[in-house]
């Protein structure tokens, strides 16, 4: 039966995709028959969550290897899809295009950073960690450098980085669930958590893998369909990705005419006017800020445990490498669509020659548009005639960046079924990332802290029960923190990357690439890098002036050099690793042969 | 482990390391260098896009995907030549 399942994967997910498309068409039909947009939204969210929960239930297991690494039998293409869902968070889905819309060229550093990181994952990390045969990232640190202290510190860094990230994802799940199901945000958060736990609790990594594949299919359809549809309706070409260069240039011509850059004379909480030029790369400082942000996001990608652990689930080293390629390809599909979406939506709002334009129209006319009213009513949009001339200027149109993706179908006049689809996609993106993160934290605590450090004699049953209890406890704590709504979605996401790369990047890389790296060096690298980064974040957030433009989004630029220098200096000042460790490093570098750690450990 | 074996593994690792360095050089150019010169590159045009902009939204991304594919093919060859192909 098991072998059967793996062989039948293309058929199973093919049927699933077909079923989902039929569901969309059915909803479109219901809309024609007069079903309300609200009901359609509820059906989309309920239907998809039910499917994920079903997959989670079918994947239940009581085996350690299945719980921690999905039995190491996930084919590369499917692991690629699962990684893509694991990777693309609520922020990528909901906030990225809005960020590009408002942030201009500087913001594109996220697009470059969040894709280029996979080159580092492939060349420096994934194949070697797969050969090692670990269950978790601290498992590698603890075995390569030896000793419980190194393992424990790796667990701490992992928990801080992942926890920062997971609260943002639960927040996003809650927001989307609350809006689609028309319930209070406070309930939405718990509802989201329930869905997330249903996917992961019974089957651990195995269940998360197969739900993430399902979630990827939903989220990519939900992202691509509206953009391509909008492009066809508005006459931007059948596939807009390769032809929106004209739109970029046109926006560049319109910007000075419309006065982009003029400050607003009023303000609305959470909403912004467009002030950054769409394509203006700026001076040397802007270039430096671009590359430092991109580098932090790349190194963070290569250090975030919920991503690295996905490559522990493939059958072989070669399969791990192939699956990194597929991961980036599936991620690329969304990331090269986001700038197209941002550009075309902006053009639709700005270009007076288009019917959808709002800038330059009469204020009253714009305020009466259905989509403007809808988003104004929930406090996410505002049109105000600041100078009293009766015409909407660029600095009189206030919008929350997050709504660019959600409002695009409405701006372009697409049917309501598309909005339901987008809600399901956003929920899939947030849930899949939250699942991966929660599992990364709970697995590190149950495997590395409980089993390896506290009770190495614990039997399988107890280990897996502890793992599940921890999953629930951490989920509940994360939901509690999320319901406080401390930071915006994106701030917290960038921090997670900086925490991860400050503490883990060099200890992981040098563990494979530098035989001389030893335990004291790794401990110094993790502790000092992580502390330096965290202290600098604290300094910037408490009003300190950013040094060399390194602000709170880039504090990995402080943590990483400290980590590298500390690790090299301390390693060289102390004894070189024993012969056994050196042989272990040699064996890690050879793709064939047995894994370093036993299959069940 | 015989010395033949470890000499083979050492050669394999040297080749792997060189390949990785080349891949990272290309990665470095398209991650950082081209974006530092975005302003100048914007003066040129590629399939209708200003080139500096094109690299940030698409060009670098396509090169990253291709880079992983190329690295994997070359690494497969290195592994096979050394007889160290994993199962």
Image (cartoon, rainbow, N blue to C red):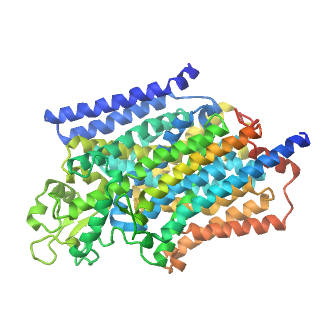
Q: Position of residue A26 (x, y in %)?
A: 24, 30
Q: Quadrant of residue A198?
A: top left
What residue is at 84 percent from the left and 56 percent from the top? A577
Above or below residue A189? Residue A263 is below
Q: In this view, does A362 lie to the left or right of A538?
A: left
Q: Which quadrant: the C terminus of chain A?
A: top right
- Relative vertical location of residue A462 with respect to residue A174 in this rendering, above or below: above
- Front-most of residues A254 and A370: A254
Tell me the quarter of the image containing the N terminus of chain A.
top right
Residue A261 placement (x, y as % from top left) = 29, 76
Where A398 falls versus A210 (above or below)? below
Where is residue A143 shown, x and y percent of the image?
A: 75, 48
B45 on left or right of A141: left
Apparent side of residue A53 relative to residue B12 in the rendered image (left or right): left
Q: Nearer the viewer, residue A61 or A71?
A: A71
Residue A466, position as x, y percentages in the image: 61, 39
Q: Is residue A452 visible?
A: yes
B34 or A312, which lies in front?
B34
């Amino acid at each position: 039966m098991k072998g059967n399942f793996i062989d039948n994967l293309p058929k199973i997910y093919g049927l699933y995709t077909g079923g989902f498309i039929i569901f969309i068409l059915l909803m479109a039909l219901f809309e024609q028959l007069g079903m309300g947009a609200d009901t359609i939204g509820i059906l989309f969210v309920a239907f998809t969550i039910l499917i994920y929960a079903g997959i989670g239930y079918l994947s239940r297991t009581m085996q350690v290897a299945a719980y921690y690494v999905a039995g190491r039998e996930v084919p590369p293409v499917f692991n690629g899809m699962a990684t893509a869902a694991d990777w693309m968070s609520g922020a990528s889905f909901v906030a990225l295009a809005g960020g590009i819309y408002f942030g201009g060229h500087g913001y594109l550093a996220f697009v470059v950073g969040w894709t280029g990181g996979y080159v580092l994952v492939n060349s420096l990390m994934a194949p070697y960690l797969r050969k090692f045969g670990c269950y978790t990232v601290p498992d590698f640190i603890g075995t390569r450098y030896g000793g419980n202290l190194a393992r424990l510190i790796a667990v701490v860094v992992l928990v801080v980085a992942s926890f920062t990230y997971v609260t943002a994802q639960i927040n996003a799940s809650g927001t989307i669930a609350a809006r689609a199901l028309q319930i209070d945000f406070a309930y939405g958060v718990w509802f989201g958590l329930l869905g997330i736990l249903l996917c992961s609790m019974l089957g651990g990594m195995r269940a998360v893998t197969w739900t993430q594949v399902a979630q990827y299919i939903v989220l990519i359809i939900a992202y691509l369909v509206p953009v391509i549809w909008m492009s066809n309706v508005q006459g931007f070409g059948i596939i807009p990705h390769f032809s929106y260069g004209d739109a970029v240039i046109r926006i560049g011509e319109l910007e000075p005419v419309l006065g982009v850059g003029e400050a607003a004379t009023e303000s609305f909480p959470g909403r912004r006017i467009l002030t950054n030029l769409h394509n203006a790369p700026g001076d040397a400082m802007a270039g430096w800020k671009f590359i430092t942000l991109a580098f932090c996001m790349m190194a963070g990608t290569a250090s975030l445990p919920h991503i690295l652990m996905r490559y522990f689930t493939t059958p072989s080293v070669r399969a791990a490498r192939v699956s990194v390629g597929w991961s980036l390809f599936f991620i690329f599909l969304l990331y090269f669509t986001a700038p197209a979406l941002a550009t075309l939506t902006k053009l639709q709002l700005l270009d007076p020659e288009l019917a959808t334009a709002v800038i330059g129209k009469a204020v009253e006319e714009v305020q009466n548009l259905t989509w403007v009213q809808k988003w104004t009513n929930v406090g996410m949009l505002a049109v105000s005639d600041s100078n009293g001339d009766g015409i909407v200027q660029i600095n009189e149109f206030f919008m929350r960046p997050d709504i660019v993706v959600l409002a695009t179908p409405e701006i372009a006049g697409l049917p309501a079924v598309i909005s339901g689809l987008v809600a399901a996609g956003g929920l899939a993106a947030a849930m899949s990332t939250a699942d991966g993160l929660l599992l990364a934290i709970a697995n590190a605590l149950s495997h590395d802290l409980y089993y390896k450090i506290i009770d190495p004699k614990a039997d399988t049953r107890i280990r897996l029960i502890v793992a599940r209890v921890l999953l629930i406890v951490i989920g509940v704590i994360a939901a509690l923190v999320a319901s406080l709504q401390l930071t915006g979605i994106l701030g917290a996401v960038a921090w997670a990357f900086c925490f991860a790369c400050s503490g883990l990047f060099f200890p992981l890389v040098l563990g494979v690439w530098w035989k001389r790296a030893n335990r004291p060096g790794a401990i110094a690298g993790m502790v000092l890098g992580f502390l330096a980064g965290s202290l600098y974040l604290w300094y910037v957030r408490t009003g300190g002036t950013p040094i060399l433009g390194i602000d709170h989004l880039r504090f990995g630029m402080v943590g990483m050099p400290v980590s590298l220098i500390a690790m090299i200096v301390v390693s060289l000042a102390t004894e070189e690793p024993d012969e056994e460790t050196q042989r272990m490093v040699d064996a890690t570098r050879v793709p064939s042969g047995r894994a370093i750690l036993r299959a069940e450990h | 482990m015989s010395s033949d074996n470890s000499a083979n593994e050492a050669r394999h690792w040297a080749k792997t390391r060189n390949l990785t360095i080349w891949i990272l050089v290309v990665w470095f150019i398209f991650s950082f260098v081209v974006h530092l010169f975005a302003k100048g590159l914007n003066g040129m045009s590629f399939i209708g896009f200003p080139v500096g902009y094109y690299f940030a939204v698409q060009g670098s991304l396509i090169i990253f995907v291709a880079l992983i594919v190329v690295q994997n093919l070359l690494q497969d060859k290195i592994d096979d030549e050394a007889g160290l192909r994993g199962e």
